[in-house]
Image: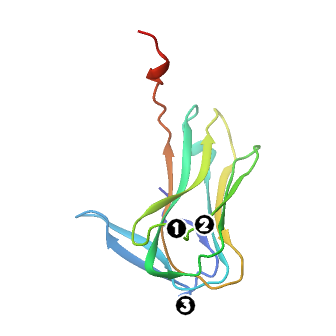
Amino acid sequence: MLYPRSLFITNMEDRYWDWKCFKETSEDNVEVVKLLTVCWLDVRGKFKMSDLTPGITYNVSYVVKLTQSSSGWELPMTLKLGVPGRTEQRRQVSLLKKPKGEWFELNLGNVYAVDNENGEVYFDIYEHGGHWKTGLLIKGVIIKPIVLTPDLSSSSS
C-alpha cells in the first residue's frame, strides 16, 4: 500500500487538506488525508515496475471514503493508470451513488509484471471541473496481486 504522504496532492496546503490519524485496528494508527475544499482535485503517484513480481497481474486502486457532509461530486472523476510501453488505462467514475462513511476502492486498472521490466507505473485521480468539492478521505493506493481461481464449471467428471 502507498500511503498519502507518498502521493503528490495538488494544493496540499493546510487550508485545503487536513491530515488525520485514526486507529485501523487495536494497535495500528493510520494516517489519512481529508479534503477540506478544492475546485481542482489531482492526486497522483507512481511505483517502480521492478518492485513487482514478474508473471503476476496486480490490481491498483485508491482506497477512499466520503464523509457524511461531503459535497460537490456531481461531475465524474477521471482515473488514470499508465504502464511503461503500454496503452494508458483511463476511465471516469461518479462518486454520487457511493456510500458515505464507508471505505471503498476506486479501481484504476491492472498491471501485468514482466521479467526485467524497468520504468515506473504512474496513476492519477483528478477532476478539474472548477466547482468546489469537499469531504473525501484518502487512505492510500493499494497494489494487490490478482489471484486467479480455476474455472471448475468447465471440467468434466
Q: Amino acid at mark 2?
A: Ser
Q: Quick one: 105 or 25, which is closer to the camera?
A: 105
Q: Residue furthest bottom?
A: 15
- Residue 121 x, y percent position in the rendering: 65, 51
- Label tally: 3
Eye-nearest disc, 3 or 1: 1
Q: Residue furthest top?
A: 157
Q: Quick one: 94 or 45, which is closer to the camera?
A: 94
Q: Amino acid at mark 1?
A: Lys
Classify residue 134 by image quadrant. bottom right
Q: Residues within 10 Å of mark 2 (few under 14, many from 20)?
A: few
Q: Residue at x 44, y 21 (%)?
A: 152
Against 153, residue 31 (above or below) is below
Q: CA distance from mark 3 to mark 1?
A: 27 Å
The residue singled out by tag 2 in the image is 94
The residue singled out by tag 1 in the image is 97
Eye-nearest disc, 3 or 2: 2
Q: Residues within 10 Å of mark 1 (few under 14, many from 20)?
A: few
Do labels 3 and 1 touch, CB within 8 Å?
A: no
Callout 3: helix, strand or loop? loop
The residue singled out by tag 3 in the image is 15
Colouring used for the render: rainbow
- Residue 36 x, y percent position in the rendering: 52, 85
- The circle on residue 122 is none
Q: Residue at x 74, y 51 (%)?
A: 88
Callout 1: helix, strand or loop? loop
Q: Amino acid at mark 3?
A: Arg
Against 87, residue 21 (above or below) is below
- Residue 1 x, y percent position in the rendering: 47, 55
Do labels 1 and 2 touch, CB within 8 Å?
A: yes
